[in-house]
Amino acid sequence: MKIMKFGGTSVGKPERMHQVAQLITKDSDAKIVVLSALSGTTNALVGISDSIAGGDREAAKRKIDELEAHYRKFVPELVIKEEARAKANAIVTEHFEFLNIILRISFSEALNKDILAQGELMSTKLFSVYLEEQGIDHLLLPALEFMSIDSNEEPNLPAITNKLDQLLKQHSHKKMFITQGYICRNSRGEVDNLKRGGSDYTASLIAAAAHATVCEIWTDIDGMHNNDPRIVDKTLPIEQLSFDEAAELAYFGAKILHPTCIWPAQLGNVPVKLLNTMQPEAKGTTIQEEAGTVGVKAVAAKDGIIAIKIKSSRMLLAYGFLRKVFEVFEKYKTPIDMITTSEVAVSVTIDTDAHLDHIIKELEPFGHVEVDTNQSIVSIVGNEIAQTPDVLKRLFETLNSVPVRMVSYGGSPHNISLLVPSEHRTKTLQLLNAGIFGL
């Protein structure tokens, strides 16, 4: 059994869906195909939900009509036969009738989750109609029947494994299944989701639950690159990464893969392949237990970082000081990305300002608090780079013109992280590409 996940750009146009059908039928392996919503759909649904929440029903109606027009145009380019077009149009009608009905319903968070689920439900149903028209045997397997999260909004992998196993046994005569990424049910049985990047998460969870041989993530880029190709001119795809290396890169800004995708695959020891729908012949990147090589492999940047420094002479020789500081962040469920300490100060970084005012207020009794916004974390990632000779020397020689605010070194053998003002982010990535990779 293998898992194949296709993102929004891979199914965003009718011809792309046709191409996906060719890719999933290239071999006779049993497979589960996970689809995202058509590109742009989730953003449109968020806009609809926001308008309803804000009481602007007219704006919501306009957005619904615009999105429906896009799908009405999509259908005749996706399927040719009248019967298939009738089925596809009936699917579009069903889901947009729902969106129009909710205009008359009081807004709630549960309703918001229902709205956001429509994209994946439509993309998979429309794709199923196309496969049926092409005579491709398959089964549409609703994610809402097996994908679930617990009361902490974490995937319930044992339950997912049990339910998926039962469903696959019920349909053991089938070799191809189509399902939705992103959507799930919560502990109350309501429609919910795995947040942004959730389709990657779905694919990885299914891979672990089904004990898959491989989890293929198909996007519009030929694998993980050594740097951000949107910013740096010369970048190279990476052929092999370990799970740990990939997790570091995904968490610290590599957009091709969502950070949550790594741990289920690592837990089940399922190799993950990052492949390009537009260039299926490209090798892409394989993520597995073994790193393959030692040394620096890639850099990534994470924006929207806030640095908080707590300075206090009472910190000197005071046990329990850091625990009290961390308890403040735990109270407001705010993760810390980086931390550095000295005898009289501790600096941490966070990536959200959702509770910043409350956090600062509770930290002030501990000492003088300084806050720097508009920061970026630049991470240099590779297998055992902390033990790589001269890596720090080369790094700081390369970045001698960049004002580095913090350095995290030694916490992980695979990662050296730097905090720089966001205005220096692009320059930092470009300098590293030349100084570390010689490109």
Image (cartoon, rainbow, N blue to C red):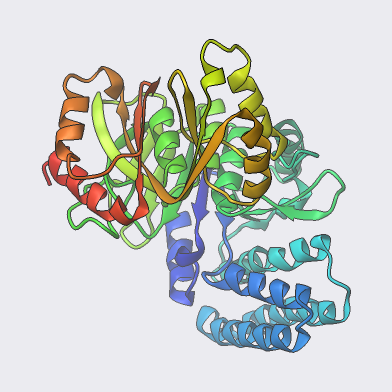
Relative to residue 261, is residue 167 drawn left or right?
right
Q: Residue at x 22, y 26 (%)?
A: 392
Vertical order, 21 against 28 (above or below): below
Relative to residue 373, is residue 183 drawn left or right?
right
Q: Residue at x 55, y 80 (%)?
A: 79
Q: Examine the image and state in which quarter residue 104 appears.
A: bottom right
Vertical order, 54 against 243 (above or below): below
Picture quarter with the N terminus: top right
Q: How many numbered circles are shown?
A: 0
Residue 268 visible to an observer of this rendering: no
Vertical order, 52 against 76 (above or below): above
Residue 186 at what x, y percent from top left?
79, 47
Residue 6 visible to an observer of this rendering: yes
Residue 334 at what x, y percent from top left?
63, 40
Q: Examine the image and state in which quarter residue 201 appears.
A: top right
Looking at this view, is 120 or 25 the one in front?
A: 120
Residue 238 at what x, y percent from top left?
27, 41
Residue 229 at what x, y percent from top left?
27, 56
Give the residue at the far left of this rendering.
438
Relative to residue 98, is residue 354 drawn left or right?
left
Relative to residue 94, is residue 311 drawn left or right?
left
Q: Examine the image and state in which quarter residue 230 appears.
A: bottom left
Vertical order, 388 against 33 (above or below): above
Q: Residue at x 66, y 24 (%)?
A: 324
